[in-house]
Image (spheres, rainbow, N blue to C red):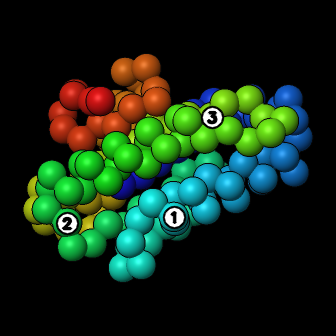
């Protein structure tokens, strides 16, 4: 799954890059606390994270990503505006290669943003 912090540029522009880094660290820790030790949370670039979820069926993967998006939505950092994330979930069973898996997750992430942000897109043009 790819996760992107919604409107992160606003945080950097209004509070400064150092404070933006605090948001990145806090959300990385929140996401790491929401997954199992067999999973991975990786900063993918800028304000984007790659989460690799292992040992879950499709329903379990969808539940995990929704839980993360919901946890970020209610998380509050003193002195910061509320933060939300958008996520694109792709399953290894849907594609033939790792590059195709990343491309599908990225496509769904952008679809989540286009659909209004603060949501998960886990299938073609559907989201929660």
Residue nearest the observer in this picture, 74 or 106: 74
Above/below status of 122 relative to 95: above
- Label 1 vs 3, first from the N-terminus: 1
State the residue position of label 1.
33
Q: Mark 1 or mark 3, which is nearer to you?
A: 1
Above/below status of 72 relative to 112: below
Marks 2/3 in contact by CB < 8 Å: the verdict is no
Alpha-carbon distance for marks 1 and 2?
17 Å
Residue nearest the observer in this picture, 128 or 6: 128
The reply to whether residue 34 is visible in this rendering is yes
Residue at 61%, 62% in the rendered image: 29
Residue nearest the observer in this picture, 99 or 122: 122
Q: Quadrant of the N terminus?
A: bottom left
State the residue position of label 2.
56
Left-right relation of 117 to 54: right
**Callout 3: few (<14), some (14-19), or many (20+) C-alpha neighbours within 10 Å?**
some
Mark 3 secondary-structure assignment:
loop
- Label 2 vs 3, first from the N-terminus: 2
Above/below status of 34 relative to 82: below
**Callout 1: few (<14), some (14-19), or many (20+) C-alpha neighbours within 10 Å?**
few
State the residue position of label 3.
83
Marks 1/2 in contact by CB < 8 Å: the verdict is no
Residue at 34%, 30% in the rendered image: 111
> Residue pushed farthest top?
116
- Which x, y percent locates residue 121? 30, 36
- Which x, y percent locates residue 119? 39, 32
- Which x, y percent locates residue 96? 13, 65
Residue at 20%, 56% in the rendered image: 60
Alpha-carbon distance for marks 1 and 3?
17 Å
Q: Quadrant of the C terminus?
A: top left
Mark 1 secondary-structure assignment:
helix
The reply to whether residue 103 is visible in this rendering is no
């Amino acid at each position: 799954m790819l996760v992107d912090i919604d409107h992160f540029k606003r945080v950097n522009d209004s509070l400064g890059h150092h404070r933006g880094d605090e948001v990145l660290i806090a959300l990385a820790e929140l996401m790491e606390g929401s997954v199992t030790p067999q999973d991975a949370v990786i900063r993918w670039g800028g304000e984007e994270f790659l989460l690799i979820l292992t040992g879950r069926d499709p329903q379990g993967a969808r539940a995990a990503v929704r839980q993360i998006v919901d946890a970020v939505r209610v998380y509050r950092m003193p002195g910061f505006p509320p933060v939300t994330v958008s996520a694109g979930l792709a399953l290894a069973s849907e594609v033939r290669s790792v590059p195709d898996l990343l491309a599908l997750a990225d496509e769904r992430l952008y679809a989540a943003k286009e659909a209004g942000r603060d949501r998960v897109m886990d299938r073609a043009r559907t989201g929660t």
